[in-house]
């Protein structure tokens, strides 16, 4: 489908209006108005939907927003569900299935609303254990069985507790940990550009500074793109998955119509209803606190999101929005290489804190790169 925004018209917009009306985000009368026009009311409704679903709140209907809108019309049992390689199935019914399987103790993977091979495997195991036809298809008999059984856990937490256990088993040393650093945008996609300062260039420079520090500790640091390339979110996630990454760190800057918008914010996978990546949330918190303490930037806190970069990566992932290029003070800081060194050190220390799990830790903002290296050497002896 084509990307739809304010000012567009046609049958695709009429479909969007109808779906928004079904969600009570537009009056029903507006949906039936045959002009199919994308006006301010539709943009406001799209933003409200995106905010509710943890999507990027831009008021534009792109592939991710359209898929979420279509998926919102399904509930568990309203259609058969199966793993289709050529035409992947997405929807609220898939999300409900994943959460239900997880509550029953099956590893359906991260609840992301996409029916993939891990969800199919968990479904087949459930069918086998409960004497159902093992076909990997969630039809009426499987839905009935899912509803009849009492859950072993609530809230989808077992999936993410496994993440936490993997971090604990990995130990406090950074050596050997494989981290994918993802500088946002790239190539023809400059990201936010203000006064000649390009988000893509800042992200690339930050990635290289962070890469150097990580390699000095013995970590395997991989950058998701080259200086002139801009992979899709799917390709970036695939790069991390193929590399077998332990963590995924996406680096961005922000922009806003208001020059007063400023500060640093961190994001991790989470649906906003209690389902969240335990390790992703923990790492986002460490990064947020370190950067706010070290840079003095406004603390815009951590936020759960269902962005594609989170739903498609198999490892814990965090995205950091470091300052607003549209804010004069943030822009001045970001243009200073010494400031970018401070940011790189803060992110490295946050990763170290994650693996320390509270042992031999130091107050926020006081742990240095030299401390990290000394700790690595001490553990090696």
Image (spheres, helix red, strand yellow):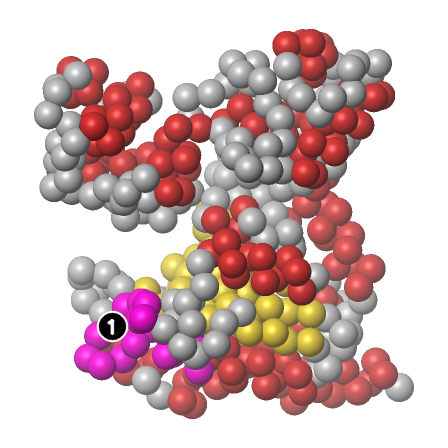
User: Residue at 12% across / 41% down in the picture?
Assistant: 7
User: Residue at 64% across / 14% down in the picture?
Assistant: 139
The location of residue 222, given as percent across then percent down, is 61, 74
The stretch of residues the image draws in magenta is: 188-205
Q: Is residue 102 visible?
A: no
The location of residue 6, given as percent across then percent down, is 16, 42
Residue 197 within the segment the image draws in magenta: yes
| Vertical relation: 1 (above or below) 82 | below
Which residue position holds label 1? 193
Q: In this figure, what is the number of numbered marks?
A: 1
Q: The C terminus is located in which quarter? A: bottom right
- Judge by depth and name the residue closer to the eye, 298 or 342: 342
- Judge by depth and name the residue closer to the eye, 37 or 157: 37
Q: Quadrant of residue 264?
A: bottom left
Within 10 Å of the Cα at label 1, are there few (<14), some (14-19), or many (20+) other Cα atoms?
some
Query: Is residue 139 left or right of 344 when viewed as pictured?
Result: right
Q: Quadrant of residue 185?
A: bottom left
The location of residue 24, given as percent across then percent down, is 28, 21
Q: Is residue 105 visible?
A: yes
Residue at the extreme right of the image, as rendered: 381
The location of residue 224, given as percent across then percent down, is 53, 69
Q: Describe the element under mark 1 as helix, strand or loop.
A: strand
Q: Quadrant of residue 1?
A: top left
């Amino acid at each position: 489908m084509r990307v739809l925004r304010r000012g567009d018209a046609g049958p695709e917009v009429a479909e969007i209006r109808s779906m928004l009306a079904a969600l009570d985000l537009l009056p029903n009368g507006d949906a039936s108005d045959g002009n199919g026009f994308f006006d301010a009311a539709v943009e406001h409704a799209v933003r409200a939907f995106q905010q509710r679903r943890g999507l990027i709140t831009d008021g534009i209907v792109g592939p991710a927003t359209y898929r979420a809108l279509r998926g919102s019309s399904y509930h568990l049992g309203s259609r058969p569900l199966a793993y289709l390689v050529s035409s992947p199935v997405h929807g609220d019914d898939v999300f409900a299935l994943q959460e239900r399987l997880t509550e029953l103790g099956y590893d359906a993977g991260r609840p992301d609303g996409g029916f993939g091979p891990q969800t199919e495997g968990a479904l087949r195991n459930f069918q086998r254990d409960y004497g159902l036809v093992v076909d990997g298809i969630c039809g009426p008999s499987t839905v009935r069985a899912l509803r009849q059984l009492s859950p072993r856990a609530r809230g989808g937490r077992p999936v993410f507790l496994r993440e936490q256990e993997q971090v604990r088993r990995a130990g406090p040393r950074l050596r050997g940990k494989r981290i994918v650093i993802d500088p946002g945008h790239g190539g023809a996609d400059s990201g936010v550009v203000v006064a000649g300062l390009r988000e893509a260039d800042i992200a690339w420079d930050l990635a290289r500074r962070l890469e150097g520090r990580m390699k000095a500790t013995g970590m395997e640091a991989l950058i998701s793109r080259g200086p002139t390339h801009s992979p899709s979110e799917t390709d970036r996630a695939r790069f991390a998955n193929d590399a077998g990454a332990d963590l995924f760190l996406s680096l961005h800057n922000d922009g806003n119509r208001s020059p007063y918008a400023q500060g640093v914010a961190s994001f991790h996978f989470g649906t906003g209803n209690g389902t969240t990546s335990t390790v992703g949330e923990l790492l986002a918190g460490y990064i947020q606190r370190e950067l706010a303490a070290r840079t003095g930037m406004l603390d815009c806190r951590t936020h759960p999101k269902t962005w594609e970069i989170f739903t498609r990566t198999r490892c814990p992932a965090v995205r950091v929005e470091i300052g607003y290029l549209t804010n004069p003070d943030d822009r001045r800081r970001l243009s200073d290489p010494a400031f970018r060194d401070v940011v790189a050190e803060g992110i490295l220390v946050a990763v170290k804190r994650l693996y320390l799990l509270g042992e031999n830790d130091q107050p926020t903002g006081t742990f240095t790169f030299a401390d990290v290296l000394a700790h690595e050497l001490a553990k090696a002896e």
